[in-house]
Image (cartoon, rainbow, N blue to C red):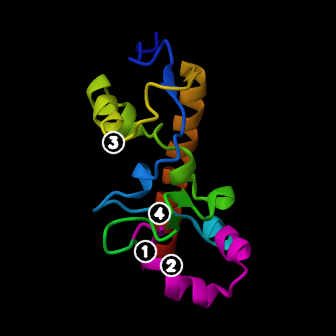
Amino acid sequence: MAKKRFYHKGLLFTCTECGQCCSNPGGYVSMTLQEKKALVAFLDIPEDTFEATFVEKKGADGEIYLRSRENGDCIFLKNERCSVYPVRPLQCSTFPFWPENLKSPYRWKLTAGYCPGIGQGRLYSQNEIEVVLKKVREARRAGAESSSEEDQ
């Protein structure tokens, strides 16, 4: 029998577009090569210009990390709004439903401390949450596998 999750009755969330999740000193935004290509196309700039302007580093795990501003804001945060919202990376589009935020009620409450949309808006069912979690885990696993293949 599956373990009963603290969110078995669902969780309320609505994006208030406050930009708090995009303003996290010490945080980072990782993206896949496909996400990078989508951003390059959306911005309509050459790939090398994108890399020089927006890429902080390439991780050993095969992921690419977006540059942050000195204050910790995402480089694409403009006037508390995401300037690349239609093609934002999966990491961004799945917040706050990340595995680390859903480990326990305590972790969810910590996340709610800086995300005013938690506890408001529509009710996401356990099934909807599990679908997002699966998507995040698969993407993370794919990133780890692609980096191990590159190492060989």
Label 4–label 2 contact, CB within 8 A: no
Residue at label 2? 54
Residue 109 is situated, as x and y percent measured from the top left of the image, at 30, 29
Judged left or right of residue 110, residue 88 is right
Judged left or right of residue 92, residue 116 is left
Q: Earlier in the sequence, mark 3 or mark 4?
A: 4
Please report the bounds of the magenta region as a residue range: 38-66
Residue at label 1? 67
Asked if residue 58 is among those painted magenta in the image, a careful observer would answer yes
- Give me the residue at 35% from left, 34% from top: 112
Residue at label 3? 114
Residue 62 is situated, as x and y percent measured from the top left of the image, at 47, 69
- Give me the residue at 34% from left, 30% from top: 108
| Residue 13 seen in the figure | yes
Q: Secondary structure at mark 3?
A: loop
Residue 138, placed above or below residue 56: above
The residue under label 3 is which amino acid type? Tyr
